[in-house]
Image (cartoon, coloured by chain):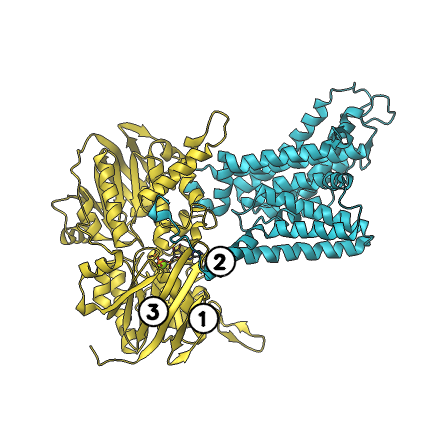
């Protein structure tokens, strides 16, 4: 480590209330030049809120922000950008039907000529240079919606870097990236550090924190807990600070009885996405699907669930061949799908926590007058949310006001409410804090113990290895092989994927 | 509270939190305050304003627009729009009226037609409304063309059809039973007012207590998420537009019965007044947000404005200017309510 560097950013005594919540209570954060500060805490601890205050998106109730020794107050994101602060947001908001380049230069398009027309050639060229300098292999003329979620995220990162900022806030930048891209991002971060850029790095992934961060600030329930050098602390100490209690094993595999085949897929194909995939999952089994982004995992389970129409192949549920033209049929067959991209296919941001939670289960609350039994609906939705510890001021709060991790938990509650026999989970712990992760793992193994079938797509190897009875490895739209719990390891999986 | 995860924390609110709370209450109930303020203002300005008769009068005057606004509220919550309401109203009015003409009237449309029971024009009228709405819904749901375009087409077609059907002339001399829909009273309360109240309550129940209602909000909130949650989005969209058509048909019955004549030019620009009422009432055009009670208040605000400005002898031209300003102001107010920055 270099000698004590100068402090570029100092936030002190920051408080912020929203209706019904005190999101931040007298917290502080101090960032040194050319260093990476991790900001950690459970879902809803106030991390994103503090960063949005810094970035001028929220106004603070009290406190001071000092940038290079001067008190500042940003009234808008534009203000922050002009003062060398940029942010990669936790929730992506790309303009899907515009090109990569247009997204990157949005709001500062290069212009030419007396009329101030947009200089498209320069825009393409600049994008090309930017992407190349970051070793990103991407066509800037492609529309955003043609990219994978991971690629969109990399574009977002490139965009933030293109402002040549002194301070970059990264709010869970890796939540939709795979190992390869994470490595790539870390290389970029190291380079930025050398150039003297300071970074605030928010993540729930412990190993990342220890790899890339110099210091760690911990919040709990809107309060500042402490700030430590990452070389001076350990994972368990950190967890302790975050959750305020000891967390024992992350993966508790309850003994579960594996029964009859529940879901069998035979030579399923979706043209252009995956080919001839066959597998069979039993009752009480946790079945993982591993692979790199673009391997066709999401498409595979979405096709089984009726979101996409299969090109060929057959699906059997409980021994009977079924035809699943739409998600509603899938739900009738006892399936549930927690989708990968919660913004696009999960949340209705302006609707309440309750409405988001109950929507897949409405049919169960119709009484004999064809009206909804709202009392029972409210009670059960509320209980399910409590069971997985959703943190919200009330059930009628718009879900957009919850922290990212808590939004994810509400979506999980949505599907648990339907009491599915076959539960598909696509990146279920994305953006969820350690404590909640452990709870979700526990829940999954309990479901299996009850004889339910769980199929889990994940890019987090440890959770697949820790939880699954068997793991299918996919690569480039093909199922490359299936490993048992005992056989599976990081190496065997990579081996199979790349052979 | 029993559960720590859902509790708000301390019982004592700090001043900061109180400020936030007050702000949120004002923004939530703002439109009701505006309405009360308006009523108060009018009552002070003119003694005749706050009388039972005048109030019933106001409500009766807004029933047609109010009925349409109920339907269009639900449509807008799904992120749609309906521009055809006024034209559908005209078409239904001439068709229903042609089936309810006095048998002894010389210029009847169907001279050979016997006196039909009152349910015939009503049922046929509602069916025409449902058909028009169904066509709107079909195009929106099945072809994916924007609702603005689909209903713009219907707006022009239905108006033309009304002209063709009636040959551009009013269809007059209607039976007393039919006229009752628009002119009758029950216990001193005008029948249109009762009808409007019943429909408002039904729509309220529909939105808040049925599966249909939950799905409407879910579709407006995030259509893709609704689809993945097992909702048949297309079917519910069609139903929503059918409901819109039926509400326009009800408005047509009320209005034609009130003036005792079906007319192809009736209901001109009603769709815009109805959309304005819904919008003033807080329905968001980005979908997923809106309430029936808000829309009812929105319609009443329009009614109070019309009536009050008449009482105060404000010229019709100035009334238009004032109404336009108030509509935009209400929406600006509403946008601030929904703004993310706090
Ligand atoms: N716009 C808002 N309106 C109301 N409440 C909000 C708003 N934004 C955040 N909150 C609340 O403030 C608290 C802190 O949220 P924040 O998003 O900062 O958490 P976080 O630490 O980033 O969590 P996560 O790890 O889940 O992203 C939460 O209780 C949340 O519900
Ligand atoms: Mg966050």
Q: Is residue A320 above or below residue B169?
A: above
Q: Position of residue B32 (x, y in %)?
A: 62, 49
Task: Provide the chain ID for the residue under circle 3.
Answer: A
Which chain is yellow in the picture? A
Question: Is residue A486 shown left or right of residue A423?
Answer: left
Of the residues tagged 1 and 2, which is closer to the observer? 2
Distance, label 1 to label 2, CA atoms, is 49 Å
> Which residue position holds label 2?
B18
Q: What mark, if any, has residue A388 been given in the picture?
A: none
Task: Provide the chain ID for the residue under circle 2.
Answer: B
Question: Is the residue under label 3 in contact with that under label 1 (CB below 8 Å)?
Answer: no
Quarter the N terminus of chain A occupies:
bottom left
How many dots with numbers? 3
The mark that comes first in sequence, 1 or 3, is 3
Q: Residue A386's quadrant in the figure?
A: top left
Name the secondary structure under disc 2. helix
Q: Position of residue A107 (x, y in %)?
A: 49, 69
Q: Quadrant of ligand 2?
A: bottom left
Residue A339 seen: no
Q: Chain B appears what colour?
A: cyan
Q: Where is residue A465 in the image (x, y as percent from the top left)?
A: 18, 48
Q: Is mark 3 within 8 Å of ligand 1?
A: no
> Which residue position holds label 3?
A28
């Amino acid at each position: 480590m270099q000698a004590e560097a100068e402090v570029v950013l100092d936030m002190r005594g920051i408080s912020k209330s929203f209706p019904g919540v005190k999101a931040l209570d007298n917290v502080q954060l101090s960032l040194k030049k050319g260093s990476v500060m991790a900001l950690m805490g459970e879902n809803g601890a106030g991390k994103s809120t503090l960063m949005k205050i810094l970035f001028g998106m929220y106004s603070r109730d009290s406190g001071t922000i000092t940038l290079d020794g001067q008190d500042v107050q940003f009234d808008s994101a534009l203000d922050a950008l002009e003062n060398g602060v940029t942010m990669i947001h936790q929730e992506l908001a790309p303009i899907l039907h515009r090109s990569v380049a247009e997204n990157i230069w949005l709001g500062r398009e290069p212009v030419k000529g007396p009329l101030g027309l947009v200089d498209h050639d320069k825009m393409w060229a600049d994008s090309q240079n930017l992407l190349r300098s970051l070793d990103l292999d991407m066509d800037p003329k492609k529309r955003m919606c043609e990219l994978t979620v991971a690629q969109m995220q990399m574009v977002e990162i490139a965009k933030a870097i293109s402002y040549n900022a002194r301070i970059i806030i990264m709010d869970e930048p890796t939540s939709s990236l795979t190992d390869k891209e994470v490595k790539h991002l870390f290389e970029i971060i190291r380079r930025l550090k050398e150039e003297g850029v300071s970074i605030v790095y928010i993540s729930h992934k412990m190993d990342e924190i220890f790899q890339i961060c110099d210091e760690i600030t911990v919040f709990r329930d809107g309060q500042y807990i402490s700030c430590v050098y990452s070389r001076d602390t350990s994972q368990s100490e950190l967890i302790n600070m975050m959750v305020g209690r000891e967390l024992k094993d992350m993966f508790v595999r309850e003994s579960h009885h594996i029964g009859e085949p529940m879901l069998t897929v035979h030579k399923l194909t979706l043209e252009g996405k995956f080919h001839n995939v066959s597998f069979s999952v039993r009752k009480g089994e946790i079945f993982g699907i591993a692979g790199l982004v673009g391997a066709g995992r999401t498409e595979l389970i979405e096709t089984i669930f009726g979101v996409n129409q299969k090109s060929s192949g057959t699906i059997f549920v409980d021994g009977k061949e079924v035809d699943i033209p739409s998600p509603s049929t899938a739900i009738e067959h006892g399936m549930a799908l927690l989708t990968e991209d919660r913004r696009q296919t999960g949340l209705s941001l302006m609707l309440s926590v309750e409405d988001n939670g109950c929507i897949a289960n409405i049919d169960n609350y119709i009484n004999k007058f064809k009206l909804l039994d709202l009392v029972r609906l409210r009670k059960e939705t509320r209980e399910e949310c409590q069971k997985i510890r959703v943190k919200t001021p009330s059930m009628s709060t718009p879900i957009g006001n919850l922290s990212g991790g808590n939004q994810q938990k509400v979506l999980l509650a949505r599907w648990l409410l339907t009491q599915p026999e076959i539960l598909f989970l696509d990146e279920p712990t994305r953006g969820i804090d350690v404590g909640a992760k452990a709870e979700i793992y526990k829940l999954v193994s309990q479901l299996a113990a009850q004889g339910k079938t769980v199929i889990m797509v994940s890019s987090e190897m440890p959770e697949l290895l820790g939880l699954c009875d068997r793991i299918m490895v996919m690569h480039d739209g093909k199922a490359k092989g299936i490993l048992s719990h005992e056989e599976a390891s990081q190496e065997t999986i990579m081996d199979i994927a790349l052979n | 509270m029993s559960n720590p995860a859902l509790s708000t924390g301390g019982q004592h609110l700090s001043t900061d939190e109180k400020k936030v709370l007050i702000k949120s209450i004002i923004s939530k109930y703002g439109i009701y305050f505006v309405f009360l303020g308006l009523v108060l203002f009018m009552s002070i300005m003119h003694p005749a304003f706050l009388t039972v008769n005048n109030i019933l009068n106001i409500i009766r005057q807004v029933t047609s627009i109010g009925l349409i606004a109920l339907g269009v509220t639900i449509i807008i919550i799904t992120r749609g729009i309906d521009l055809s309401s006024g034209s559908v109203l005209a078409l239904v009015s001439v068709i229903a009226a042609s089936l309810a003409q006095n048998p002894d009237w010389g210029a009847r449309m169907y001279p050979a037609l016997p006196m039909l029971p009152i349910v015939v024009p009503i049922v046929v009228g509602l069916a025409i409304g449902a058909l028009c709405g169904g066509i709107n819904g079909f195009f929106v749901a099945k072809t994916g063309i924007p609702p603005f375009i689909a209903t713009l087409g219907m707006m022009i077609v239905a108006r033309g059809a009304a002209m063709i059907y009636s040959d551009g002339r009013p269809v007059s001399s209607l039976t007393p039973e039919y006229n009752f829909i628009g002119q009758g009273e029950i216990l001193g309360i005008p029948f249109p007012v009762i009808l409007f109240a019943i429909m408002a309550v039904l729509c309220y129940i529909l939105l808040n207590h049925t599966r249909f209602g939950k799905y409407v909000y879910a579709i407006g909130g995030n259509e893709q998420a609704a689809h993945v949650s097992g909702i048949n989005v297309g079917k519910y969209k069609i139903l929503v537009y059918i409901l819109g058509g039926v509400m326009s048909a009800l408005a047509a019955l009320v209005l034609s019965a009130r003036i005792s004549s079906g007319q192809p030019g009736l209901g001109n620009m009603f769709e815009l007044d109805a959309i304005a009422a819904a919008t003033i009432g807080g329905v968001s055009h980005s979908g997923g947000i809106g309430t029936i009670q808000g829309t009812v208040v929105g319609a009443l605000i329009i009614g109070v404005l019309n009536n009050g400005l008449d009482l105060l002898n404000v010229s019709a031209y100035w009334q238009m200017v004032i109404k336009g300003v108030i509509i935009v102001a209400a929406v600006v107010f509403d946008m601030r309510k929904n703004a993310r920055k706090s």
